[in-house]
Amino acid sequence: MSSPLSAIAGRIAELERELERRFDEEFAEKQKQFRYSVEKGRIAFDSGVGAIHERLRKNWVSYLWDMPRYSLLVSPVIYSLTVPLLMLDAWLWLYQAVCFPVYGIEKVERSQYILLDRGRLRYLNWLERFNCNYCGYANGLVAYAREVSSRTEQYFCPIKHATRLAGASPRYQEFADFGDAQAYRDNMAPLREELKKPG
């Protein structure tokens, strides 16, 4: 990578660390504001909050009645993704279980990507909770799949594409430039080393 791009990538990494720190601070503020805590993955609201939430819950029949009819018509297509998503989830588990130990690649923690916490909100009716969990699962699974595949790409083919790639993973910037055979050979071992389990 050329040095101006390396400098920009370094600044981006620094800004991402700052963004993470600020997100953590904001989450702490929101927990105080909405009176809940999270300990070991368990969410607990202060006493009295549940009653307030239940009063704000919309009956699921009213929820469906108020929904635009076209939303109901396309819902079977939305939910048809359930089977491929479950198959992808199972295949990613198998892929990591079989392949990552062979190459010494640290496994991706699925629980860091798939969070189903919105389904615990008492101001949502059962259908809204189901929808929130479905979206959380689908989007989390895609992010999880991206991390698994990007680790695989870093191990086997850390080469940038010939043209600009939209939505590249953060580690993509470390890859060798397209056509730079020497950088590809020189950087392969260090990039593979980065993927190994700590310790």
Image (cartoon, rainbow, N blue to C red):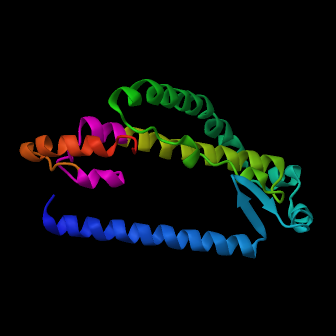
Above/below status of 25 relative to 191: below
Whole-percent x, y for residue 56 in the image: 87, 65
Task: Give the quarter of the figure containing the N terminus.
Answer: bottom left
Whole-percent x, y for residue 182 in the image: 7, 44
Dividing the picture into quarters, in which one does residue 98 lie?
top left
- Viewer-closest of 44 and 163: 44
What is the residue that sits farthest to the front in this orientation?
199
- Viewer-closest of 86 and 153: 153
Above/below status of 137 relative to 173: above
| Residue that appears at 14% across and 47% down | 178
Task: Give the quarter of the figure containing the C terminus.
Answer: top left
Tell whether 155 sits left or right of 96.
Answer: left
Dividing the picture into quarters, in which one does residue 28 lie?
bottom right
| Residue that appears at 34% across and 36% down | 152
Above/below status of 152 relative to 67: above
| Residue that appears at 67% across and 36% down | 76
- Viewer-closest of 146 and 27: 27
Q: Is residue 68 visible?
A: no
Tell whether 175 sits left or right of 109.
Answer: left
Whole-percent x, y for residue 10 in the image: 28, 67
Tell whether 14 sits left or right of 74.
Answer: left
Whole-percent x, y for residue 173 in the image: 26, 55
Region in magenta: 151-174
| Residue that appears at 87% across and 49% down | 61
Tell whether 168 sits left or right of 80.
Answer: left
Q: Is 27 colored magenta in this rendering?
A: no
Q: Is residue 46 visible?
A: yes
Dividing the picture into quarters, in which one does residue 184 lie?
top left
Total numbered labels: 0
